[in-house]
Image: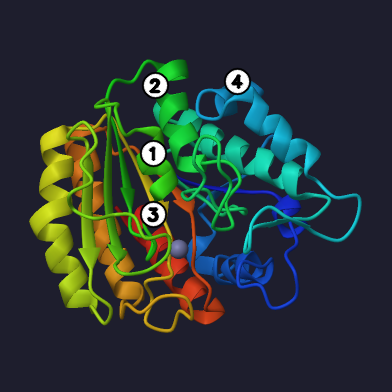
Amino acid sequence: MTTCLLHHPVFLDHLTPPGHPERPDRLRAIADALDRPQFAALLRIAAPHSDMEDILAVHPASYIERIRTAVPQEGFAAIDADTFMSPASFTAAMHAVGAACTAVDEVIAGRATNAFCAVRPPGHHAEPEVAMGFCLFNNAAIAARHAQRRHGLGRVAIVDWDVHHGNGTQAVFWSDPSVLFASTHQMPLYPGTGAPSERGAGNILNVPLAPGTDGAGFREAFTTHILPAVDAFAPELIVISAGFDAHRDDPLGGLLLDAADFAWATGELMRLADRHAKGGIVSLLEGGYDLAGLAESAAAHVAALMEG
Ligand SMILES: [Zn+2]
């Protein structure tokens, strides 16, 4: 089996103000970890620029134009209290979408079994017409739509284990039962959505975790709720919103996971992907703000994807 790694140097040029947790060093830490000999077999692909049609499947043209024209000539433009753009941010966001869609192409064509996209900016908080939570375009939602529109897939499952709720992804698919959105996240925490009562068209599954939940609690939630729902949905592709900010050392979250928990969850989803989706998994980096915890967790996740 082959695992793709989608990357691009422009992701390091998306800058945020000093002290901001969502910073280029996050990707440098992951790149260092994935430079080890253990990862030599990764099929490394430079992410192309996105096709605008792919973004338009999730975000209206007026929103894309608003983001494009918000790009500053120098310094930073504040989109909201914690979401910023620098001169290269729009280009970076376009390549992040390109990474997600190319990963889908590689997996569905069978050139790779699965893929990890080491991208910035992240995407799961971006709603169709609202940039927020460090996110500009919703990479996971666009990947799912790309799989459906370009490749004719019917059912796509998006599993989101970022410590924050993926309000943007939920908003995109709120009334669309062709996409299952299944999320574990800390509650209460930003952005405040993600209660179990939020069910969409029956295709939304929110499993909030109390602050202080450890790996055992996370695995129980996954085993009891997330995995049976994905299995029953029988997706033709699984997209993972892979945030690693549920790690015990993360400064933004209050959960107590470690790298082995992310590797375990990866393996469980791979079993379901083998059953329903010819093994197809496209994983997208979302959060993760402790550099050591992020690098160790992402490496464990990618190692699991490679090992099968
Ligand atoms: Zn997060």
Q: Position of residue 26 (x, y in %)?
A: 61, 69
Cα–Cα gap, marks 2 and 3: 25 Å
Q: Is residue 93 above or below residue 209?
A: above
What is the crowding at mark 3: few (fewer than 14 residues within 10 Å), some, or many (at least 20)? Answer: some
Cα–Cα gap, marks 4 and 2: 13 Å
Cα–Cα gap, marks 2 and 1: 18 Å
Left of 189 or right of it: where is 83? right
Q: Position of residue 45 (x, y in %)?
A: 62, 43
Q: Which residue is mark 2?
A: 148
Pointers 2 and 3 in contact (CB under 8 A)?
A: no
Q: Which residue is mark 4?
A: 53
Q: Amino acid at mark 2?
A: Gln
For marks 1 and 4 on the same chain, the one whose residue lies earlier in the sequence? 4
Q: Amino acid at mark 1?
A: Ala
Q: Nearer the viewer, mark 2 or mark 3?
A: 2
Q: Nearer the viewer, mark 2 or mark 1?
A: 1
Q: Nearer the viewer, mark 4 or mark 2?
A: 4
Where does ligand 1 appear, by image quarter? bottom left
Q: Which residue is mark 1?
A: 171
Residue that appears at 29% across and 26% down: 176
For marks 4 and 2 on the same chain, the one whose residue lies earlier in the sequence? 4
Q: Amino acid at mark 3?
A: Met
Q: Position of residue 260 (x, y in %)?
A: 30, 73
For marks 2 and 1 on the same chain, the one whose residue lies earlier in the sequence? 2
Per the image, label 4 sits on a secondary structure element best described as: helix
Q: Which disc is residue 244 wearing?
A: none
Residue that appears at 19% across and 43% down: 272
Q: Which residue is mark 3?
A: 306
- Camera-side residue of 289 and 84: 84
Per the image, label 1 sits on a secondary structure element best described as: helix
Location of residue 186 (image quadrant): bottom left
